[in-house]
Structures are given as C-alpha cells and as structure tokens.
Image: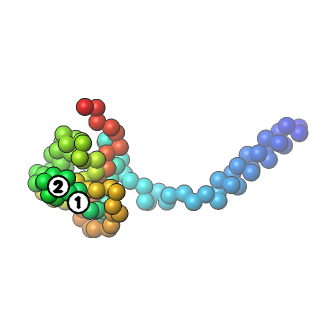
Amino acid sequence: MALALAILAGVMTFLYFRSLVVMVPPGLCPINAGNYGVQPNTNGVVFQGCSGPCVFAAENLASAIQRCDADFNRCSSFAYHTGTMSYIDMSQPTHSEVGVDLYGRQVPINS
C-alpha cells in the first residue's frame, strides 16, 4: 500500500512540474511535408552564398525541393512563393509574410 502511494505521489509530482513547463502551442508547430517542415506565411533573410542572393525561379514546389536537395551544402531551408524560391539563412530571424511558406529540411541528405 505504501509503495502504491509513493508511486502515485511521484506521478502526481511529475505531472505538476510538467504542467509548469512552457510548451509550444500546436498551432505554432511546423507542418510536416515529407522531408520538410513547413511554416506557413513565414519568410526570412535570403542566404547570400550563391555569388549573390540565392534566389531562383521554381516552376512548382516539387522543383524547389529538388533544387534544394541537389544543393544541400547551401540549402537547408527555403522560402517558396509562386514561381520563386529563396534559400533562407536560418542564423537570422524569420518574419511573417502572407503568401510565402518557409520549408526546412527535417531529414539529412546522404551524399
């Protein structure tokens, strides 16, 4: 009986302290899109490592993903807006921008 009360007290203590931890609201979590997490209506600072800004034409999202995967040394995240993709410098803060979605690679590329 004493052991059951001790276990119950331990579980209750754990749950109490867990409730004090600030958790990320589910609405702010990235959406999974295959190998990429998606942050809707989000953009960032364009990466400058492509002989200037890394901004490219992309016929569709699939071609943007293909380009990012092919250039995995420079592209770990990109912003996509109809017909255009930009590699994003994730060492810089992101910001809200309606109509632009930020895609971040969730799975490493094997070279």
Per the rendering, the mark at residue 46 is 1
Residue visible at 18% across and 40% down in the picture = 70
Residue visible at 61% across and 57% down in the picture = 21
Disc 2 crowd rating (10 Å Cα; few below 14, some 14-19, many 20+) is some
Q: Quadrant of the N terminus?
A: top right
Residue visible at 19% across and 53% down in the picture = 49
**Quick one: 46 or 103, which is closer to the camera?**
46
Looking at the image, do the residues carrying marks 2 and 1 touch, with CB atoms under 8 Å apart? Answer: yes
- Find numbered disc 2 in the image and state the secondary structure of the residue it sits on: loop
Q: Mark 2 points at which residue?
A: 54
- Residue 33 screen position, x and y as percent: 31, 46
In the figure, residue 62 lies in which quadrant? top left
- Residue 46 screen position, x and y as percent: 23, 60
- Which residue extends farthest top? 111
Between discs 2 and 1, the one toward the N terminus? 1
For badge 1, the amino acid type reads Val
**Quick one: 70 or 15, which is closer to the camera?**
70
Per the rendering, the mark at residue 94 is none
For badge 2, the amino acid type reads Cys
- Residue 77 screen position, x and y as percent: 28, 51
Q: Can residue 86 be seen in this view?
A: no
Residue visible at 28% across and 56% down in the picture = 89
- Residue 45 screen position, x and y as percent: 26, 62
Q: Quadrant of the C terminus?
A: top left
Disc 1 crowd rating (10 Å Cα; few below 14, some 14-19, many 20+) is some
Q: Using the image, determine if residue 24 lies above or below residue 108.
A: below
- Find numbered disc 1 in the image and state the secondary structure of the residue it sits on: loop
